[in-house]
Image (cartoon, helix red, strand yellow):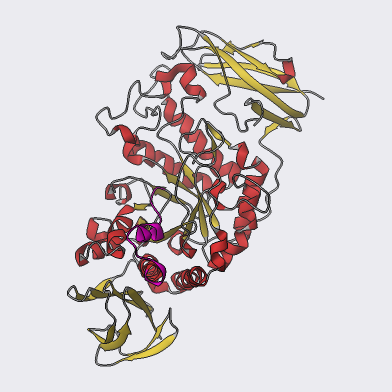
Amino acid sequence: MPTSVEFKLLAPHNKAAVLIGSFSDWNEIPLQKDDKGYFRTSVELDDGVYQYKFRIQSKSWSHEPDEWVEINDPYVTEIDASTSNGVVRIKDGERIVDDYVWHHDDKLLPENHELVIYELLVSDFFHGTQDNHQGHYTNVIEKLDYLCELGINAIELMPVNETPGDYNWGYIPSYFFAPKPEYGSTQELKHLIDECHARGIRVILDQLYNHSSEESPLLHIDRDYWYYHDRHHPDADPQDYWGPEFNYEYKDETLGIRPAWEFMGDVMRFWVQEYHIDGIRYDALKELDNFDFLHWMTEGAKQVAGQKPFYNIGEHIPEKPELISPNGPMDGCWHENLYQTLKPHLCEEAFDLDQIKQAIDPTQQDYPQGLIKAVSYLCNHDQKRLLLELGDRDILDDAAFSRAKLGAVLLMTAVGVPLIWMGEEFGDCTPINADEPDQQLGWLLLQGDRNRDLFEYYKGLIALRKQNLALQTANIDFFHENPEDKVFAYGRWNDQGARVVVVASFSDQFRADYQIPHFPENGTWHEWTKNYKVESQNNQLTINLGEYEAQVLVWQ
């Protein structure tokens, strides 16, 4: 039995609009405009799947005045891959995204301070056994047991929104509610998230609120209603412009709404409610530059998430500690400085102990106190992989992998939430190119001794990071500094007696019987990465310290 289904389109300044779709043999259905600025109509539809679009007289300066243009619904939740039309699904007389049934919503998930995040790009992570040119959600599911073995407990998916073209990283979205069909169906994306939850893995989604592609329907309805007429920051670096930028300052005084706020608030609520995500990474906040809007978004996301843990992470390059101040909008932000500092030090281009200390302890860079304020990494999707950087400098084989291990120790024991870019855990060397398909991780590398050893090393450090509560606080003390020998040591602890000490050497010399004074406790310590015990006496510890090596000592 047919049910009346409403279609609506916000366009307060436009003269006329019509609906077309498979349910009308693509004949025009008139839309009536109400006093809230919406064009509306209702169509009698049986349960089923239909395709549709709108035609509207544009108010955008990129078109002729009142030119008729054909657009998809800005709120469309699915795009047909073959026709590029919007898709609407009706079941039991109601609009649905799909009929997926969630199975693991009752699973307890780790809190923010417990997280070890794994950033991945669906298209390049794993292509499966078939001759695919890019990965799918189902391929990520195939590798979840691998990620469980590694020990991570959160994945950060690079954007999955529909974008122009078949292959890209997703950072220039066209449709903010519709996932990329190239990655799989909406049900398959939900299944991936559900299977992550079944394994105690949280899912953080990279989201774009600063800009869109030129294909966004909002641009063709009334560009200046949702976007800045020109650039938000006209004097900014042209390389920092990725598309038309949303105007979060504009308010429609007649309707009493902020159009860009309303739209993006709906986007945020949709993904938290419909896809059960556990956090959002907010891209390009330097360019977005509106704390009021961000406060509103992050508070709204946590309200929608309810009782489950939720993590709002900002990306602002260069870093802006005000984002995560007591009055700031974000829970945490990307700590670019750790990468920028450790790369030249691991590549033998510098040694500045004060810089290293600032990278490991973000409070020395005006970050507020708190473990979850900094999300730190040795590499991410924007940066060249560490082993490639080392190889460019003819640092190869054992020398390169020892430096990768040193970096891993500092990442996993620094104050903050550690993030691993996919493949770093086994020394992947695939170049990063945002525009080229067929860039699957080099999974066969895991058959090599050095690569497998690096994976096991990461696995052990992740286990320590999750198990030892000393690493889940913001407490840190650099108690030994020897810049001449390029050696330093720091302690992490909690108030219940857990202690971890890291002794790190950036020297290319082996140090036999190296003495570390002012050691925090006398007694037995367990070296985590080599699995041996050592005694400290008279607040001093003596160890053999290899070139470019860190040792991790756990209080027994």
Q: Is residue 425 left or right of residue 489?
A: right
Residue 106 visible in image: no
Q: Residue at x 28, y 61 (%)?
A: 359
Q: Residue at x 46, y 25 (%)?
A: 214
Among all residues in the image, which is located at the extreme left? Answer: 484
Q: Quadrant of residue 524?
A: bottom left
Q: Quadrant of residue 375?
A: bottom left
Q: Quadrant of residue 20?
A: top right
Q: Residue at x 32, y 53 (%)?
A: 336
Q: Where is 464 relative to 416, above or below? A: below
- State the count of labels: 0
Is residue 387 inside the magenta stretch?
Answer: yes
Q: Is residue 176 left or right of residue 295?
A: right
Q: Quadrant of the C terminus?
A: bottom left
Residue 543 visible in image: yes
The image position of residue 526, as x and y in percent, is 41, 85
The image position of residue 493, as x and y in percent, is 34, 75
Among all residues in the image, which is located at the extreme front? Answer: 394
Over which residues does the magenta segment extend?
A: 382-399
Which residue is at the front of the view, 110 or 253?
110
Q: Where is 306 relative to 514, above or below? A: above
Q: Residue at x 43, y 49 (%)?
A: 381
Is residue 28 inside the magenta stretch?
Answer: no
Q: Where is 314 relative to 208, above or below? A: below
Q: Quadrant of the N terminus?
A: top right
